[in-house]
Image (cartoon, helix red, strand yellow):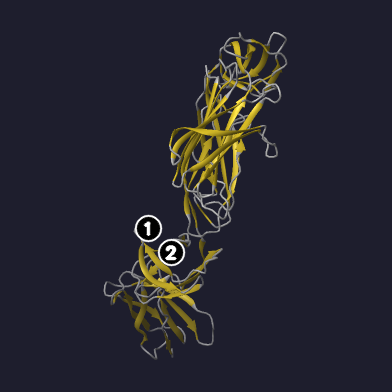
Amino acid sequence: MRRTSFLLVATALAASALLVPATARADVTDAKLTVAFDRLAEDRVAKISLNVKSASGVTGVQAHARYESSTAEPYATVDLRRTQGTDGDGVWEGEIRPDITARAGTTVVDTVITTADGATTVRRAWIDDCYVTSIEGLGAAPAVVDVEHPDVTLTGRLMVQKSHDRAPEPVQGMTINANSARTATGPDGSFVLRTQGGGHVYAYAQGPYCALSEDSPVTVQQQTTEISARVTPGWTVAPGTQVSVEGKVVRHGSAGLAPAAGVTVALDLSSGLADRSPLQVKTDADGTFHAYFTAARDVGLSGTVAVEARGGEFLAGSKASLGTLNIRNTSTIDDFVLRGAPIAYGEAIVADGTLVLRPNYTDETDLPMYLEYSRDGKTGWTIWARQTLPRPMSFYFNTTKPVTQDGYWRFRYPGGPRNTAAVSPVKYVDVKYRTQIYDFNASPEPVKKGKTITVKGLLDRFMDKAVPGPNAPVSIYFKPSGSSKWTQVAVVKTASNGWFSKNFTAAKDGTWMASYNGGANYFASNKPSDYVDVR
C-alpha cells in the first residue's frame, strides 16, 4: 500500500534560479542545497546543508526561512558555517526550527551565497511542517469491481502520530475523498465512504495534519474495448470539406460484446490535415459516436486518420487506423461530345469537352488530357490522342488517326499531386463502311413502249480500298415524268462482283433511281438516277 505522508523530508535543489546583481557576475559553479526534516523528531529541527564551489571563494552563506507566501517576511535567519572543505569548495551547515503551533504547513528556505567577487547566488528548498497521518484498517466491500458492478464502500480510521515516542491517535472532522465522493471522519477518526471504482483515498492537509494519499484496496477488472469507424464522403476530398467519422465502441462484457456508453473518442490526425483541431466526443448509450473535422485548405496534403477510444478506470482504451486522407482539387470532365457518330471506316474522331477543377486555389497549369479507346468499354483502354491544357478549360480533339473498328471512347485526366483524376462518361461509336453505286444506267434510250428497260449498276464498299459489295439489296425507284413522287418498284441483290441488274417493261417516260439503304455495317449509298424517254 502506497503512502505519501512522509516521516522524513529531504529536499535537494542543485539548479535553482540565480539572483545576481547587474554589476557583478557570480562565479559559483555548483551549489546543491539539502534541507532534512524529520516530522516525527521531538525537537522538529530542519537541518540545512549546502555544497558550494566558487572560483573566487565564498565569503558568507545566510538562510532565510519564511512561510509559503511571496509576501511573507522571514521568521528565521541563520548564518551557515563551513563545516567541510575550503571557501572555494566546501560544505556550509545550519539549523532552523519551524513552529508547527504558530503556523503549520510549508516553509520556504532561501540560502543566499555571497562570493569574494561581490556577487550573490540564491538556492531554494521547501519543507512541510505537519504531523504524520495514516489510515488504519482501510478496507473495501466488495474488493473486486467492474464497469457492470462499480459501487464500492470504503471504510477506515484516520490517525495522526506526532512523534516517534507517541502512539497514533484518531483525527476527527478531517475530509476524506475518493473519486468524486467525500465524507468527514468521526470522533474516533473512522469514516464510511460510498463511491465507485478504485483509485486513491485522499486526506487533504488540514491544520497541522499532513495530507495523505493511499491506494484504494479495490481491484478493478478492466474490460477491453473495440472501436470501429467509417469516413465520409471518402478518402480524397476537396479543401474545406467537412469530413465525418462515424463509428461504435463496444466492450467485452460478461455476457459478450456490449455497447460502451460515455467513452471519450478522439480523432488522431496527421499534423496539418484538419483546418482546426477536432473536438473529442463521447459515445451515446448504444456506443455510437459521430465526430467531424474540416479538411485543411492545403491542396496536395495527405495524412493518416485514426480514431481512439480513450480508456479509463473500468475500460481499456482501443485505437483503429482508418486510412489516408488526401486533400485535392476535385476534377471533372464536363460537356463530352463526339462529333459525327457513327463514323465512316477510316475517318478520324472529333471530340470536345471541358476540364473543371474545384476549388483550384492553386491555379493549376500544364494539365494532361487523354482521349482513350477500348473495344469493350471496360478493359484495354489505350491512349488515342493527347494534349496538355494550359489551365482548366474547354478543349477540342481533331485527330488524324483513322478509326477502323467499333468501340468505346472517353476522356481521361490522370490527376496529379494536387488534383483528383477524372474520367468522362463513356460513349460508343459505331464504325461503318461507306458505299457507292457506280456506272448506273437505265437503257435503251429512247425505248418503244412495251419493250424492255434494263436498270443496272455496280455497288462498291470502301474498306481499306474499294471492293465490290456482293449480295447487297439495292432498291430500284421510278418517278413518272411530271411527278415528284418516287415509287419503289423492285429490290435486287448484287452479284458476287457487286453488279446488279433488273429488267422492266417500258410503259411511260420517267426517271429511274437506285439506292443501297445501308445496314448494320454499311452506310447508305449515293442515289444515282437516269431518265428514259418511252415512245
Residue 126, how many percent across, how many down?
Answer: 58, 32
Q: Residues within 10 Å of mark 1 (few under 14, many from 20)?
A: few
Q: Position of residue 386 (x, y in %)?
A: 39, 71
| Amino acid bearing label 1 | Asp
Q: Quadrant of residue 164?
A: top right
Q: Is residue 141 visible?
A: no
Residue at coordinates 28% horizontally, 75% vertically from top-left? 464
Question: Looking at the rendering, in which quadrant would you find the C terminus?
Answer: bottom left
Q: Is residue 178 visible?
A: yes
Between 318 and 128, the residue placed more toward the observer is 128
In primary-sequence order, the first of circles 1 and 2 is 1
What x and y, as percent, mark residue 340? 46, 73
Query: Could you say where residue 417 lies in the image, as x and y percent from the top left?
Result: 44, 61
Identified by mark 2, the residue type is: Arg
Residue where numbered disc 2 is placed: 412
Left or right, 13 with respect to 208, comes to left
Give left or right: position of 347 versus 238.
left
Question: In this rendering, is residue 99 above or below 33?
Answer: above
Q: Which residue is mark 1?
A: 376
Q: Is residue 73 above or below residue 512?
A: above
